[in-house]
Structures are given as C-alpha cells and as structure tokens.
Amino acid sequence: MSLPSVIEAAGRHARNLLIATAAFAGVLGLASCDKGPARPPCPEGKVCLQVGNGSEPISLDPHKVQGTWEHHILLDSFIGLTQEAADGSAVPGVAERWETSADGLTWRFYLRESQWSDGAPVTADDFVFSFRRIVSPQTASEYAWMLYPIRNGQAINEGKAAPETLGVRALGPRVLEIALLHPAPYLPELAKHNTMYPLPKHKIEKLGDAWARPENYVSNGPYRIVAWRLGDYVKAVKNERFWDAGKVCVDEVYYYPTTDAISAERRVRRGELDINTEIQSNRIAFLRADPVMAPYVQTHTYLGVSYLAFNANVPALKDRRVRQALTMSVDREFITNKLLRGGQVPAYNFIPPGVANYRPIEPPAWADWPLERRQAEARRLLAAAGYGPNNPLKLEIKHRNSPDPMLVMPAIQADWKQIGVDLRLAQNETQIAYASYRARDFQIADAAWVADFNDPVNFLNLMQSATGAQNYGDYNNPAYDRLLALADQEVDAERRAEYLAQAERLMLDDAAVVPTYFYVNKNLVNPKITGWKANLVDWHPTRYLCVR
C-alpha cells in the first residue's frame, strides 16, 4: 500500500476499535460489581426523593460554585428576583413585578413579603449585599463577570472601585433598583441564576464563610440544606417558611455524587435513585429498547456545547495554523453518530441552536469537505508551522472523567494521530479538571458550557478578555471585545444580533476553541414522578415534582 493508504487503513482500524471498545465498556460496566448505599428510610407520611447528581459540590455558597451539579442543589434552596417555571422559563420570584426605564438602563423590582428559613425577612438590602459580595475581589467568584452589566461591576471586581459604588440600591425594604451600564434585555433571565440570588446578610456578617456549612445554612427557597456528608450526599428538607410551601410536595431530597453513569443507571433500576441527571450517551438506544427502563429515559434539546480550549500561553498553540489544523481534523460526525449516539449534533459554531436572540452564522467552508481532504489540509498547515515526521507536534489534553469525554477523547487522539500529532490524554476528576483550567494548568482543555441564561452573550462572553477564570485559554482579541461592546450598547435587536454574529465568526476564524458537539440533556426519571417537564435549560426544581 502507498503511505496515504496505510494511514487511511490505520484510521479505519482505530475507529472500529473505538466503537468496539465503547460498546464493550458498556457491557463491562453492567457486569462489574457495584453496590451503592441503600435507599435511606423516608419518615412515615413524608415524600422523599433520591437524586443522582453527577459530581461532588465544591461548595454550597452560591458565589463559590460553577457546575451544573451544584446548581441543581442551589436551585432548590434559593429564589432570585425571578425564578424558573417548570418549563425553564423566567417567571416572577422574590420580585412580584418590575419596571424598566425607557432607555433600558434602570430596573426597579418590587419584592413580595418573604422570609429566610430562620424567620428573618428577605429584604432589598439582602440583594444589595449579595451583589456587592459577588463582585468584590475578596470573594474571588469566577462568576463575577455575569454582573458586569451592572454599573461599576467590572471596575469593582478589578479593584478599581469600592463595592459601595455598585449600581444597586434599596429604595425601601421591598424595592430594589438596578442601574446598568448598557441595556440588558436578558436581565430577567439572568436574575434567576445563582449569581443573582439574595444571600442572608445577617448570617454572613456574623459568621463569614462559615454560614455555608449545613449547621448554619439559611436559604429563602423551597428547601433548606441540613446535611452534607462528603462523598455520600447532600440532604435538604422542605422549608416551611417558603411563601409557597403549601404547594411543595416533596419533603426531603438527597443529592448523590454519581460520576459513574452506568453504576447510577443500575441504582435507578434497583429503585435506590429516583432520578439520575446523566445517561451514558451510547446506552440511550439500549435503554429505550428495554421495556422496563424505556419510560425512565428523558432527553431534550439542550443549550450546551462541548469544546476544546487552547491555552494561549503554550508556544505551539500561539500559531493559528496549528490551532486551525487541530480543529478542522476532528471528525465530529463520527463522534456524534458512531460513539455517542444520544442525539448530539456536530458543532462547527460555538452557539447552540435554540438560543434566543441568535442569528446562526454559516459554518466554515471546510466543514463540508470530506475528512481526507481536511486531514490533508491540516498536515499542510502543520508543515507550514514547522511540524512533521522529523519534528512531531506533541500535546496533551486534560479531560474530565465523566462518561461522554471518556468516550470522545480517544477518538480525538486517533483523529490527530492521522495528521501527525502525538497526543497524550490526562484524565482528571471533573472538579480537579476545571480547577486546572482556571489555573491555566493545561495545554488543551476538554470543557463544556451550558447556558446560565438564554442569550448569545452567555456563550460569547466566555472568550472576552475581561472574563477572567472562565476564559480558560486566555483568548484576547481587541476586535472581538469591541464587537461585544457594540452589541452591549445596541438597542436594535437586529443590529445587536449582527454584532454578535460577527464576534462569533471572528473568534472561530481565530480557532480560539474547537467546538465538537452540541449537547442534549439526558436524565433517567422514575415514571412514578409527576411534574417533570423536559426543557432547553434542563432545570427541574424539586418544588414542581411529586411521587405517585
């Protein structure tokens, strides 16, 4: 055979081996011995829910978290100015109503009468205190950038202004005013996120960070956290002081870290878990063919993207030709159609379909090329950058140990081998992986982003130079920042969408990241549970659920 034929044959062999390995891993996982903790007894006359929740929380402080698994817990414990309906949309929360100035820069929220779980009133001062706390540099919240639309939010976070200058003020115990730097029509969506939850000022001023320990925990939502056994569970019980407690069915909720999706699947089958917030993608078809488990499978379009971030501080990755070669040689169709097989869609853009106020851009021209042509062009780009058989490019991907990345990373390793890249895989527990990304301790990061609120800026702001920790690769392009700034100031929806589309195209032309696929959300839900509504954001507050 000629050398190209040998390479092509090796690629086919690697792909077949990956598919066989993935299938065998599923069978092996089911055959392995797994015995999770028995279902704890539910008090007589009470309704209890056992939830498999992905990973161990890093904190129970809304300002110190960053994962969806933590958000699932906080979603039950707190209510912001707005809250999520059962379908994931934003509806009034602590704020019963609000009004906006003609220029869109001043918002006034009128709060309902409500209490913290210890009986203290929830006031506008709690919101002011919370917003100042999250943007304070001393808090070191990686989500502080979400409040940059508020006047002086960025200046405070960068140590250039005092927290008291933040554009929020209490006009009375139950009236909150927010002054923005630029119009933010998505503010009601953002206001339901944990970055804008109120925090108990009276507790934090007394206890500091110790307020977030279960024995001190105070919340204003349907549940209050009463226990956290590290590596085992977080437990929450119904908050009888919640203003709508009479409509809350479930009395106790246990959230378990379930990093092994197949083990969690078995626990759902045995009745030890009522819900698991993940399904290993390549098992969805199998489960749907199983008459017992088919009613448990819940999937839906999701506002999430899986991607690789290039560390701009790595010499080889400073070269756009290298980044371009790597992104164009990933076989996304093989990953989604042959490996994952859960309904995921190949991603050539960064913003998922279904995001509000989004104008989709055309994918790159090479997206329609046959894989062999893309590989040939990638080899040419690498050669132009000085890499080839006599000087192979050696790189490492640091990746999460969650189910789908464990399937996908060997496929990317095989893809890049075809263009002469010697790639090492470094597996990490999810929390450790993201800590490394924030510390820039990686060359290439396997990451994902799920929308915190439904607007394109929630995706595009990740690569803004001022974003900080969550701009994992330290992408910095002044032209990109200018386009996002223009979009921020634009009140015309069409022109705003055009600026955002230009920014996305510029960032992808720079090959700042490698979008790989768009998510579907995947849950196992016992059919005895009522009130579950699949939705774009995959938010399912326990307050809407019950058990038949």
Image (cartoon, rainbow, N blue to C red):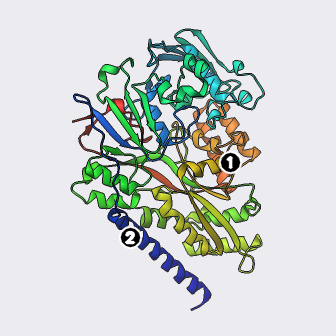
Is the residue marked by circle 2 packed among few (<14), some (14-19), or many (20+) residues within 10 Å? few
CA–CA distance in space, label 2 to label 1: 36 Å
Q: Earlier in the sequence, mark 2 or mark 1?
A: 2
In x, y percent, where is residue 539? 42, 38
Disc 2 is placed on an element classified as helix
Q: Which residue is mark 2?
A: 24
Dot 2 amino acid type: Phe
Q: Which mark is residue 394?
A: none
Q: Are marks 2 and 1 in contact (CB under 8 Å)?
A: no
* Number of marks: 2
Q: In this view of the protein, can residue 240 be seen by the observer?
A: yes
Mark 1 lies on a secondary structure that is loop
Reply above or below: 426 against 391: above
The residue sitting at 77% across, 72% down in the picture is: 386
Residue 146 in the image: state x and y as whole percent.
61, 33
* Location of mark 1 (residue): 439
**The furthest residue to the bottom:** 1
Give above or below for 76 relative to 278.
Answer: above
